[in-house]
Image: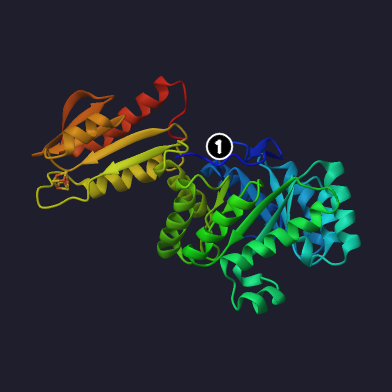
Amino acid sequence: MRRKITNPVKLGSLVIGGGAPVTVQSMTKTDTRDVRSTVAQIQQLEKAGCEIIRAAVLDYEAAEALGKIRQQISIPLVADIHFDYRLALTAIEQGVDGLRINPGNIGSEIGVKKLVQAAKSAEIPIRIGVNSGSVEKDLLDKYKKPTAKALLESALRHAGLLEKYGFDDVVLSLKATDVQTTVEANRMASSRTEYPLHIGVTEAGPYSSGTVKSAVGIGTLLYLGIGDTIRVSLTGNPLEEVRVGWSILTSLGLRRKGPEIISCPTCGRCQIDVMGIVEKVTALTEDMKVPMKIAVMGCVVNGPGEAREADVGVAGGKGSGVLFSKGEIIRKVPEENLCDALLDEIKNLAESDGKKPLE
Ligand code: SF4
């Protein structure tokens, strides 16, 4: 997997692009004016591994709340603004780390100029986010529907408005509700520009189908070396967006964080309660930060092999299981104690790295 090296763009303490690790981001689902709920949600997301957070800014009250929110969180805060550049100016005054704005829809050209000046002096980047649901009318007339080419032309047009005033601290996103258009649009964008790309399938849907759609779309692009930061869009708890985002990166070997559980699907040969153990281990290690491969296998067919390859694992036998750690057999454990023995070993292993395992 060779990654395209894009322009590095600084966002708070992070870098997007330029070969920096692919970051996981999400968006708050609270009313931004409600500082308390918004901060609480961001803090939960941070704990789950969210690295960049975006909040919708609908009015001045929301823009003015950003400063208070910013003070209470430790990840970069991006203000998402449509139609009114003055809200963006207020957001900048409030100390946001970045803006998501489409310069073509924020009012007059004077507004774009003022916005560019303010973003330049605050040294913050702008993400231009083009979605299939908001492609401009003339492009819809030209392409008949929001095709990949329409998304690309829209993104480049918005970027051109910023470039006109000497601003290129830009991240682009081109999102459609279907995987093929999203992949095609980003492939074209990647070959046409050096801007870093924020990737995702927009409005991907509820948890189960949205996760699959996002994994296929984002995963395909990342596998092609395209994409510098990701957002999984799900109708549901934003914590799931972050967890799914990390699973995508872990599956591709791009980042490691927390547990990667390897468990067999079980079959008629299964000797232990694989599902029960996996459920418990998943719940208890959900927010673990130490990267660790954990295998839970039902029998001796593939069990010992997978458990040996993992950092820690169990392979089921009749009425008992064998516990492995770092490729070595630790001991045979009766089935009723197997889950606890596995959790103890996970803890030991993580602590031996000097890190807190189960926070
Ligand atoms: Fe079945 Fe054993 Fe394979 Fe699990 S490891 S699916 S129990 S054969």
Question: In percent of the image, x 62 and y 75: which residue is there?
Answer: 143
Give coordinates of residue 165: x percent, y percent. Answer: 86, 51
Q: Quadrant of residue 238?
A: bottom right
User: Quick check: can you spot residue 28?
Assistant: no
158 and 204: which is toward the camera? 158
Q: Where on the picture, by quarter, is residue 286?
A: top left
Q: Secondary structure at mark 1?
A: loop
- Residue 217 can be seen in this image: yes
State the residue in front, 97 or 229. 229
Pointer 1 residue: 21
Residue depicted at 53% across the width and 47% down the height: 226
Three-letter code, disc 1: Pro
The reply, left or right, for residue 99 in relation to residue 353 is right
**Drawn side of residue 2 relative to residue 349, left or right:** right
Crowding near the residue tagged with mark 1, few <14, some 14–19, many ≥20 C-alpha atoms within 10 Å = some
Q: Quadrant of the N terminus?
A: top left
